[in-house]
Image (cartoon, rainbow, N blue to C red):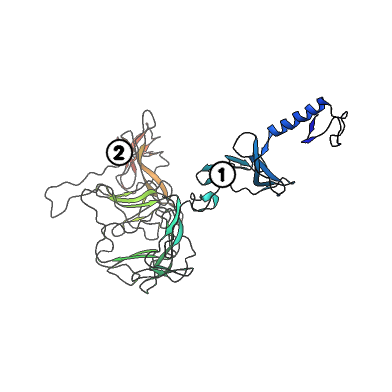
Amino acid sequence: MSRSAGTYTLPSNSVSPAVADTVISPTDFNAVMDDIETAVNESTYTAGLGATDNRLVRTDGTDTKKIQGASVTLDDSANMSGIAALSATTIELGHATDTTLARSGAGDITIEGNAVYRAGGVDVALADGGTGASLTDPNADRIMFWDDSASAVTWLEVGSGLSITGTTLSASGAAGDVTAASAFATDNRLIRSDGTGKGVQASGIDIDDSDVMTTPGRIIATKNGALDAPTIAVNGTPISGGTATTTKPLVLLEHGGATSNAWSTSGTVLGINFPTGFTGNAIDIQRNAVSVLSWSTSTGWRFGSNVNLTVSGATLSWTGLGNTILTSPAAATLQFGATDTASPVAQTLRAQGSRSGTDTNVGGGNLTIQAGTGTGTGTAASLILRSPVTVASGTGAQTQTTGLTITSGVPYVPSYTVAGAPSAATAAGIIYVSNETGGAVLAFSDGTNWRRVTDRAIIA
């Protein structure tokens, strides 16, 4: 006899054992008994499974063959219920690689290795929307802020002069605090007092990130007495804005707190005091970061290499005492006196002398005028003296004529022909006559004629 799904059936060649007095084959009877014995040995129920449908069975722990009913059910849709506690290292929720629930420590679980935050657990990181730190109730109004030194969010305490009312943060000023009546919309704008004691307002002066100051007005510095150090330095381009005039200069230094726009006529207008041992430039006026005019204790006043002080046009002017004026009317030309005029002023170039009535038997300084020095076999420079020669009456310019040339240390007088010799009306003149009878010769003027220096004969 064979078993099928727990149901025992008689072989086809046997009569039904349910019929009384039916003879059963010994072989078949033995097979039935064997099957019953096997079934009894395979499992034994220690208790009833109960009336609950879909209840799971479990061993009862007494031996390997006894089972009992469990409280957990598994319905026809594979839904499990009745589990009081589940003990497992990992649980796959519908998928083995993207939804794995695992235990990471006491009371902590992860999903695919990512911590599941819980109340009383670890601090929630910033990346997960937390604060990165455990915060406690400060029991006072506080501001939450990021503390970079601690790499966490913490409470910011409201200090003096600030208060929180509801959701409003207020500032209250104390004595001496500075307040602004309006916002400053212009970048780099310098602020100034508004005259109320604690208020400030925007000025018209800007200081950019390179410390360059721009002002549309003037800078007026007043001090009674000498200044300990330079107060205003103008380097490179001039201060922008405003118009410099004789009565309202762009930069005005007034003595003694003067209120007029004119320069003070007495006292110290600007004093610059440098300590003992100072060796730099006490005054240095520059253009495009190159010195134009400077003064130091060792060299005195010095013009820079790019001096371009202009009075008018292309004229470079320097004014000293009285009417001493040095100008440059043309390229590579230096002139004593101002620009040409209807009343020219005579000029004198001289070396320093001793003091009459004070110095005893002291000679004056030599005056040396020299041409430029060359090198090697280059053409030697000449020292040339010229003076004008009169022309026809009118406004035509007189002709500049060379009167003496010194070359290689040798003086040379001008050369003329007999017919082209200049007027001899002024005595004591010397010329070189190139075509004189008997050969070239020097001649001198006697106030009427040119005469040969060899025999005093008139040139012919």
Q: Which residue is mark 2?
A: 456
Secondary element under disc 2, as helix, strand or loop, is loop
Q: Which residue is found at the position 84% from the left and 37% from the top?
A: 18
Q: Is residue 244 visible?
A: no
Front-most of residues 60 and 157: 60
Horizontal side, residue 301 vs residue 130: left or right: left
- Mark sitting earlier along the chain (2/1): 1
How packed mark 1 is, by other alpha carbons closer than 10 Å (few <14, some 14-19, many 20 or more), is some
Residue 142 lies in quadrant: bottom left
Q: Residue 324 sits in which quadrant?
A: bottom left
CA gap, disc 2 and disc 1: 133 Å
Q: Split into 4 quadrants, where in the image is the C terminus?
A: top left
Q: Residue furthest top?
A: 27
Residue with the most extreme left position: 360
- Mark number displayed over residue 110: 1
Amino acid residing under circle 2: Arg
Percent from the top left, x then y, of residue 211? 41, 55
Judging from the image, what secondary structure is the residue with disc 1 in?
strand
The answer to whether residue 359 is above or below residue 12 is below
Q: Residues within 10 Å of mark 2 (few under 14, many from 20)?
A: few
- Mark nearer the viewer, 2 or 1: 1
Residue type (three-letter) at the residue carrying disc 1: Thr
Measuring from the top left, give residue 154's x and y in whole percent. Answer: 44, 56
Q: Residue at x 24, y 64 (%)?
A: 225
Residue at (42, 50) in percent of width and height: 150
- Whole-percent x, y for residue 386 in the image: 37, 45
Query: Which of 384/257 is in front?
Result: 257
